[in-house]
Image: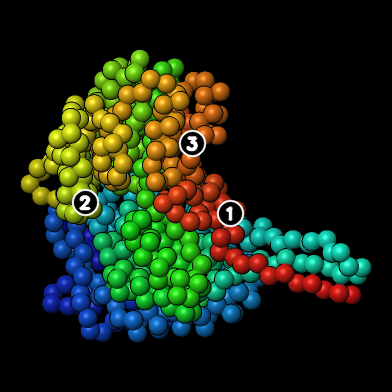
């Protein structure tokens, strides 16, 4: 049964009424706080074009209050043994599991993610918090040999202080954990700014935090736009690290703002992932996995394959298989009556961007063998699953990030050509190759200029890996040992005895 528009919410965090609309409140120092005056930002269901809530565009004063609360809490939080900090993370993960279905529906309603994937996001978030808790006994320093008799040199790993976590909208609930988990386990406190597109899940997260024993001020949440709240955080003298996931353009602005106080940065930005299909590949497998990676979250994933290089000898057969896979993709309202594989694009601006890139490719000689246009379902922001052939390296569709369910195909004559064209980009987040030759696979791993390479599998990282990009795809990274250490700074002690 399809719920009526707005029927899901908001059962989330603390809200107030504003002209008949639910208005979320910031969460500062363990309390929900009204943001006062200023612009109110409406939150839309992208599948139905309905308003489901609103958030404040909070003032710099609200940011100051949140940062002050985080700074005040950080000293005592850092003094706790890490194993105690881990206990609080496990309390939060338990609350996430208890409320997983509600979380999934909130994510689906505001972001458009299909319900099964939203459930995966909720479950993965809980698992990620537990994984970060496991690092409590594994964060290590070093003992360094001295040149002096009787001297010991110790390298300590210590917290940086207050972390600002600025979130995207595509995996909004999980990204709270990706920012919060490593920050808290290493002794930092955090102020989170959710995307104005998807704040409802963050409000729910804040509510769950109130049901744990997490000390006040350790986690804070402030709503608003990037140009107001985001900028106030990145320029704040007491914020010692900014962790951001989003566009290259916004990342560049954050770098400029953070330069004022020489604030540490961790940036995961855009991607233009190549997928290489070699003549000896299992073409059925390649078509299925590339399609699955491209339509996951409606293609709104930085990891997803954005361009395909296929050897000419097998190009026609591969395109035939890929086209059949993309044509079979069901799309629509993720909370509707019919089972679907793909939901809407997050907003109309996203649809317009995809349309402009596809139209430009078609005008330059590409051909849409399936899709190629905006989907008219009567409501919502939808674009047809699309395969483009006769594409060239100089086309915008090959050079610019699409962030939608579009797969442009370029034919190549050799592995050498495929690698050269794959590396012809300013991005460097993820890449993939499909081959049954281990030498080919290892050569690709050595020569592709990307932070990640997937061989004969879908484009999705593991929490114990290290998700990091090259070039304009970012600075630093997340997950695993190296993601934990990103949230520390070193302190050398020279002890003469």
Residue 46, quarter of the rendered image: bottom left
287, 129: nearer the viewer: 287
Residue pointed to by mark 2: 350
Label 1: which secondary element: helix
First in residue order: circle 1 vs circle 2: 2
Looking at the image, which residue sits at the far right?
149
Whether 410 is drawn above or below 462: the answer is above
Q: Is residue 454 visible?
A: yes
Looking at the image, which residue sits at the far top?
313
Residue pointed to by mark 3: 448
What is the spatial separation of the Cα atoms under label 3 and label 2, in whole angstroms?
Answer: 29 Å
| Total count of labels | 3
What is the spatial separation of the Cα atoms under label 1 and label 2, in whole angstroms?
Answer: 33 Å
What is the spatial separation of the Cα atoms under label 3 and label 1, in whole angstroms?
Answer: 21 Å
First in residue order: circle 3 vs circle 1: 3
Q: What's the residue at 37%, 50% (across, down)?
A: 270
Q: What's the residue at 52%, 20% (across, down)?
A: 437
Say which mark, if any, is on residue 482: 1
First in residue order: circle 3 vs circle 2: 2
270, 377: nearer the viewer: 270
Looking at the image, which residue sits at the far front?
394
């Amino acid at each position: 049964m399809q719920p009526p528009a707005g029927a899901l919410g908001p059962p989330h965090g603390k809200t107030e009424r504003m002209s008949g609309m639910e208005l979320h409140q910031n969460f500062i120092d363990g309390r929900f706080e009204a943001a006062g005056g200023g612009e109110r930002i409406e939150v839309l269901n992208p599948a139905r074009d309905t308003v489901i809530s609103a958030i404040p565009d909070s003032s710099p004063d609200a940011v100051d209050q949140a940062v002050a609360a985080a700074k005040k809490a950080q000293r005592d939080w850092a003094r706790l043994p890490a194993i105690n900090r881990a206990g609080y993370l496990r309390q939060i993960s338990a609350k996430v599991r208890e409320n997983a279905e509600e979380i999934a529906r909130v994510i689906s309603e505001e972001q458009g993610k299909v319900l099964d994937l939203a459930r995966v996001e909720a479950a993965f978030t809980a698992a990620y918090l537990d994984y970060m808790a496991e690092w409590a006994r594994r964060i290590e320093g070093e003992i360094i040999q001295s040149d002096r008799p009787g001297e010991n040199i110790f390298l300590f790993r210590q917290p940086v202080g207050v972390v600002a976590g600025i979130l995207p909208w595509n995996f909004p609930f999980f990204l709270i954990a990706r920012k919060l988990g490593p920050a808290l386990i290493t002794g930092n406190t955090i102020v989170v700014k959710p995307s104005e597109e998807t704040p409802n899940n963050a409000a729910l997260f804040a509510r769950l935090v109130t049901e744990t024993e997490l000390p006040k001020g350790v986690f804070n949440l402030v709503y608003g736009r990037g140009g107001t709240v985001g900028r106030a955080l990145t320029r704040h003298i007491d914020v010692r690290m900014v962790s951001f996931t989003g566009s290259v353009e916004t990342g560049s602005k954050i770098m400029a703002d953070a330069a004022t106080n020489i604030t540490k940065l961790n940036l995961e930005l855009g991607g233009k992932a190549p997928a290489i299909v070699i003549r000896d590949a299992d073409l059925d497998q390649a078509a299925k996995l590339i399609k699955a990676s491209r339509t996951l979250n409606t293609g709104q994933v930085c990891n997803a394959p954005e361009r395909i290089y296929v050897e000419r000898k097998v190009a026609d057969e591969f395109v035939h298989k890929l086209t059949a896979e993309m044509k079979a993709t069901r799309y629509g309202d993720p909370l509707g009556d019919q089972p679907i594989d793909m939901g809407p694009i997050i907003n109309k601006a996203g649809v317009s961007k995809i349309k402009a890139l596809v139209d430009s490719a078609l005008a330059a000689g590409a051909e849409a063998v399936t899709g190629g246009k905006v989907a008219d379902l009567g409501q919502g922001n939808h674009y047809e699953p699309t395969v483009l052939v006769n594409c060239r390296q100089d086309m915008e569709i090959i050079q610019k990030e699409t962030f939608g369910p579009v797969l442009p195909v370029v034919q190549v004559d050799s592995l050498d050509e495929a690698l050269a064209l794959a590396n012809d980009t300013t991005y460097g987040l993820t890449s993939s190759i499909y081959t049954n030759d281990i030498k080919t696979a290892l050569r690709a791993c050595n020569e592709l200029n990307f932070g990640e390479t997937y061989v004969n599998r879908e484009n999705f990282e593991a929490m114990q890996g290290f998700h990091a990009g090259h070039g304009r795809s970012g600075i630093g990274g997340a997950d695993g040992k190296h993601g934990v250490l990103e949230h520390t700074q070193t302190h050398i002690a020279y002890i003469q005895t």
